Amino acid sequence: MGNPESTVLVKGKMGRPTLYTEALAFRICEKVAACEAVHQFAGKDGIPNEATIYRWLNEHKDFCENYTRARERQADRMVAECREIADTDKEKMGAVERDRLRVMVRQWGAERMAPKKYGARLKQEVSGPNEGPIEVADASRKLLDLLDRRASAGTSA
């Protein structure tokens, strides 16, 4: 991520400078990777509000790339937590329904945050009439026939 102490001053649209540091961006990414929701930590402990964080994602390519990796780490962590919950000792089986719900929520979140990695694999087949092969018409031949008909209709008029 570069030097976390470096500061970049960005001038906003209204002329008011905003302070962006790589160290602050790093803190935000670490919170995201630790499964903290942006709306829960934004505006607290020296972290800007949500709107500023999302604006910075658009304005700072490095921050956006690191945030994307943090979201991937977040999904990996959720999958690991699902395993821990599912592998709970039999002594803790009294809260099975609660744990099942916790696992399902984490799976759902991981599927949406990293669909290529954790999403359902869908296979889609396309076929022609009566489950036969799809016939691909020669479009150039049809276009030439159409142009020939127009030309002959224009000369006979």
Image (cartoon, rainbow, N blue to C red):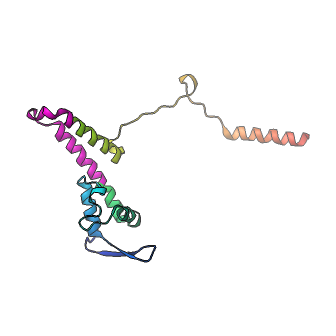
Overall secondary structure of the magenta section = helix
Q: Which residue ends up furthest to the left in the rendered image?
A: 91
Closer to us: 94 or 81? 94
Closer to us: 91 or 73? 91
Tell me what residue is drawn at x 26 percent, y 72 percent. Answer: 3
Residue 87 included in the magenta stretch of the image: yes
Quadrant of the rendered image containing residue 143: top right
Quadrant of the rendered image containing residue 123: top left
Task: Report the magenta residues as a range.
Answer: 71-99
Residue 43 included in the magenta stretch of the image: no
x and y, in percent, of residue 155 in the image: 89, 42
Closer to us: 155 or 22? 22
Q: Is residue 71 above or below residue 16?
A: above
x and y, in percent, of residue 30 in the image: 24, 59
Tell me what residue is drawn at x 26 percent, y 52 percent. Answer: 73
Quarter of the image containing the C terminus?
A: top right
Quadrant of the rendered image containing residue 12: bottom left
**21 displayed left or right of 85:** right
Tell me what residue is drawn at x 45 percent, y 33 percent. Answer: 124
Q: Is residue 119 above or below residue 133?
A: below
Closer to us: 10 or 79? 10
**143 displayed left or right of 31:** right
**146 displayed left or right of 55:** right
Q: Which residue ends up furthest to the top in the rendered image?
A: 130
Tell me what residue is drawn at x 28 percent, y 41 percent. Answer: 105
